[in-house]
Amino acid sequence: MRKIPMRKCVATQEVLPKKELIRIVRTPQQTVEIDITGKMNGRGAYLKKSVEAVEVAKKRKALARSLECEIEDSVYERLKEMFMNE
């Protein structure tokens, strides 16, 4: 039996399987990217795949704190669009 990798959502503090979360990365070039593959270089933070989690992360500045940089509104908007389509 294989072990399922678990990660913690920075917004909701829930521990969920890695596949149920999306990774946001601060790259070595100090840009913030949405990492769909889960393999990008840089400091990563995991977020639950829901619009509510994105709103909580924005309100509490959870992503900014975790990635130790400012997060532009465009990143939050792209995340919301991705989750609305699911």
Image (cartoon, rainbow, N blue to C red):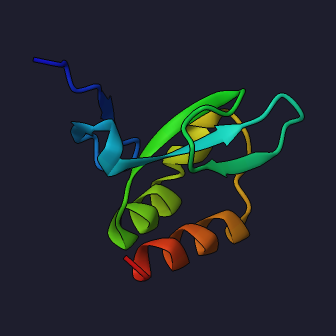
- In the displayed structure, 34 sits above or below 28; it is below
Q: In the rendered view, tell whether residue 75 sits above or below residue 7.
A: below
Residue ID at (67%, 63%): 75
Residue 34 versus residue 59 in the image, above or below: above
Is residue 5 or residue 26 the one in the foreground?
A: 5
Which of these two is toward me, 14 or 2?
Answer: 2
**Of residues 65 and 75, the one drawn nearer to the viewer in this rendering:** 75
Percent from the top left, x then y, of residue 27? Answer: 78, 34
- Residue 3 vertical position relative to residue 58 in the rendered view, above or below: above
Tell how many labels: 0
* The N terminus - image quarter: top left
Residue 39 in the image: x percent, y percent?
A: 60, 32
Residue lying furthest front in this view? 1
Asked if residue 19 lies left or right of residue 28, the reply is left
Q: Estimate the x, y position of residue 61 in percent, counting from the top left.
A: 54, 51
**How far from the left and from the top, in percent, is residue 31?**
82, 44
Residue at 34%, 69% (x, y): give it. 52
Q: Residue at x 33, y 31 (%)?
A: 7
Residue at image x 63%, y 35%?
A: 67
User: In the orientation shown, which residue stands out farthest toward the left?
Assistant: 1
**Which image quadrant is residue 66 in?**
top right
- Location of the C terminus by quadrant is bottom left
Taking the image as shown, residue 48 lies to the left or right of residue 77, namely left
